[in-house]
Amino acid sequence: MLPGGRSYSRSFQAEVQVELVKGLEAKAAYKYLDVRTDYTGQLLPRPLTSPHRIFANIAYATAFDKWRADLTMQGFGKRPLAMSPGEGGQHGGHVPGQPLPRAPRFALFNTQVTRAFKHWEAYIGVENLTNYRQRDPIMGANDPFGPNFDAAMVWGPVYGRMAYVGFRFRLE
């Protein structure tokens, strides 16, 4: 990025929410991001920023909210990667006319079930339900003082599926 260089950001977002039947709600959203920055005289997409993102959620609650359950999906489109330090740094080694390397598209799924009582709730959930992970998120990890070491290229989850259980208490 050059001092005084050009950059811009444009975005668009659309959302919809509907109650399908009593107690069953669905939500969906789409976001488009066009973020560009001047790298050595070239206006290029900002690294690690996905231009296409989607969100979907379906939630159900029984009468009096005794039971609640939901399933959420977050989708991330392909995103440009920066050039590695050995290739000249952030887009610095980019050859005009050549496509930038891109991270793959992926989706994350999370779910939770809650049981409500008079003054407390118990819940159980799972994050990253499909166990999707970015393999080898640290470039050059075997040589941390070498020219190709880069810990800033994380574009996806580095943890796998995670289950949890919890309690909430209401003080009145």
Image (spheres, grey):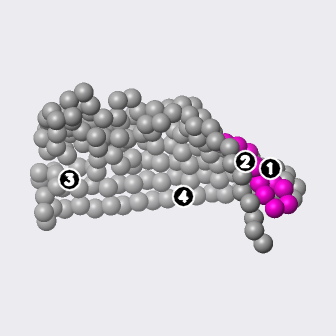
Can the viewer see residue 42? yes
Q: Which residue is mark 3?
A: 43
Q: Earlier in the sequence, mark 3 or mark 4?
A: 4
Distance Cα–Cα, label 1 vs label 4: 32 Å
**Residue shown at the point (28%, 62%) measured from the top left:** 8
Q: Find the magenta span and give its range.
A: 113-125
- The residue that label 2 is drawn on is 123
Q: Position of residue 44 (x, y in %)?
A: 23, 49
Whole-angstrom CA distance, mark 3 to mark 1, is 52 Å
Which of 94 and 61 lies nearest the eye of the viewer?
Answer: 61
The answer to whether residue 81 is above or below residue 114 is above
The secondary structure that most of the magenta stretch takes on is strand
Sequence-wise, which precedes: disc 1 or disc 4? Answer: 4
3 and 4 marks in contact (CB < 8 Å): no
Residue placed most toward the observer, 148 or 48: 148
- Mark 2, secondary structure of its residue: strand
Upstream in sequence: badge 2 or badge 3 = 3
Please, what is the three-letter code of the amino acid marked with disc 1?
Arg
Circle 4 residue: 14
The residue furthest bottom is 172
Q: Earlier in the sequence, mark 3 or mark 1?
A: 3
Counting from the top left corner in percent of width and height, residue 160 is at 51, 33
Mark 4 vs mark 2: which is more N-terminal? 4
What's under tag 4, amino acid-wise?
Ala
Image position of 86 with respect to 41: above or below: above
The CA span between labels 2 and 3 is 47 Å
What residue is pinned by disc 1? 115
Q: Are marks 1 and 2 in contact (CB under 8 Å)?
A: yes
Q: What is the secondary structure assignment of the residue under circle 4?
A: strand
**Amino acid bearing label 3:** Leu
Residue 142 x/y as whole percent: 24, 27
